[in-house]
Amino acid sequence: MPAIEISDEALQKAMRAAHTDSPEVAVSKALDEFTRSHDQASLIKHLGTFEDMDTPEEFQRMREMD
């Protein structure tokens, strides 16, 4: 695997956010979060476009009922 350069400050912040002192764990968690967020964003644009799928307003009403 190729080596990459990450600033010490960015790596320290990622390690604090990930609650770890392992740079590898912090970077792995950051990449997982990034891809999960990207996947969600690509799905969100389809909300309300499928006939059998609830609209954002319907999801909000369901949340308010809980």
Image: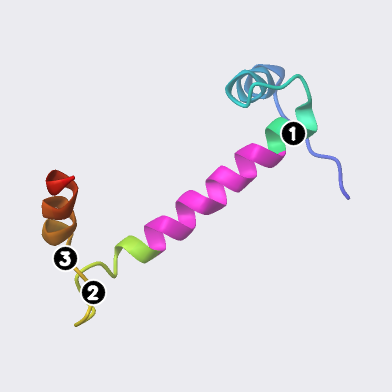
The total of numbered circles placed on residues is 3
Region of the chain picked out in magenta, as a range: 28-42
Which is more toward the observer, 66 or 2? Answer: 66
Residue under label 2, please give it. 53
Tell me the colour scheme of the image: rainbow
Residue at (13, 60) in percent of width and height? 58
| Residue 53 x, y percent position in the rendering | 23, 74
Q: Residue furthest front?
A: 66
> Label 2's element?
loop
Q: Which mark is residue 55?
A: 3
User: Label 2 crowding class (10 Å Cα cut-off): few <14, some 14-19, many 20+?
Assistant: few
Residue under label 1, please give it. 25
Find the distance from the CA under tag 1 to the CA under tag 2.
Answer: 37 Å
Q: Are marks 3 and 2 in contact (CB under 8 Å)?
A: yes
Residue at (71, 22) in percent of width and height? 20
| Residue 46 x, y percent position in the rendering | 29, 70
Above-or-below relation of 33 to 17: below
20 with respect to 50 (left or right): right
First in sequence: mark 1 vs mark 2: 1
Q: Is residue 35 magenta?
A: yes
